[in-house]
Image (cartoon, rainbow, N blue to C red):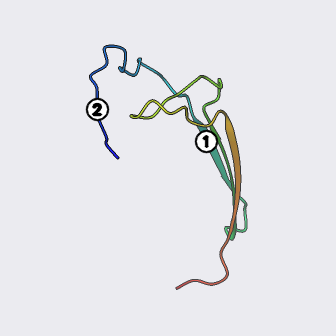
Amino acid sequence: YDIAWYPSEGSLTPAQFSHDFGASYRFPTGKLIASLDVKNVFNTALYDNFGVQKPGRGVYFKLNYTIGKF
């Protein structure tokens, strides 16, 4: 068993831009907060430092409810 790392001229990750969007709304009672986040809005191809492609667009919804004040 042998591991060999060979130099590669084409191993550079190209410049890439990810656009994210997020918004939150606090309801008038102050106990409930609704949040919406969109990651990679334009669904562009993104890669990590090892050249592995990252997931595409993601949409996340979150509800926070405050039970009591500490």
Please give the label number shown on residue 62: none
The percent coordinates of residue 47 (x first, y second) are 49, 29
Kindly identify the amino acid type of the residue bearing the numbered disc 1. Gly
Q: Nearer the viewer, mark 1 or mark 2?
A: 2
Expressed as whole percent of the image width and height from the top left, the position of residue 22 reads 61, 42
Q: Which mark is residue 5?
A: 2
Q: Residue at x 67, y 81 (%)?
A: 67
Residue at x 48%, y 23% (from the top left corner): 17
Q: Is residue 65 above or below residue 6?
A: below
Three-letter residue code for mark 2: Trp
Q: Residues within 10 Å of mark 2 (few under 14, many from 20)?
A: few
Residue 31 image position (x, y, % from top left): 69, 71
Q: CA distance from mark 1 to mark 2?
A: 41 Å
Residue 22 is tagged as: 1
Residue at image location 45% in from the left, 29% down from the top: 51
Seen in the picture, residue 18 relative to 38 is either above or below; the reply is: above
Q: Is residue 32 above or below residue 6?
A: below
The percent position of residue 63, horizontal first and vertical second, equals 71, 62
Dot placed on the residue nearer the N-terminal end, 1 or 2: 2
* Viewer-proximal residue among 15 and 27: 15
Depth order, front residue of 31/37: 37
Q: Is residue 30 shown left or right of residue 12?
A: right
Q: Residues within 10 Å of mark 1 (few under 14, many from 20)?
A: few
* Residue 33 appears left or right of 16: right
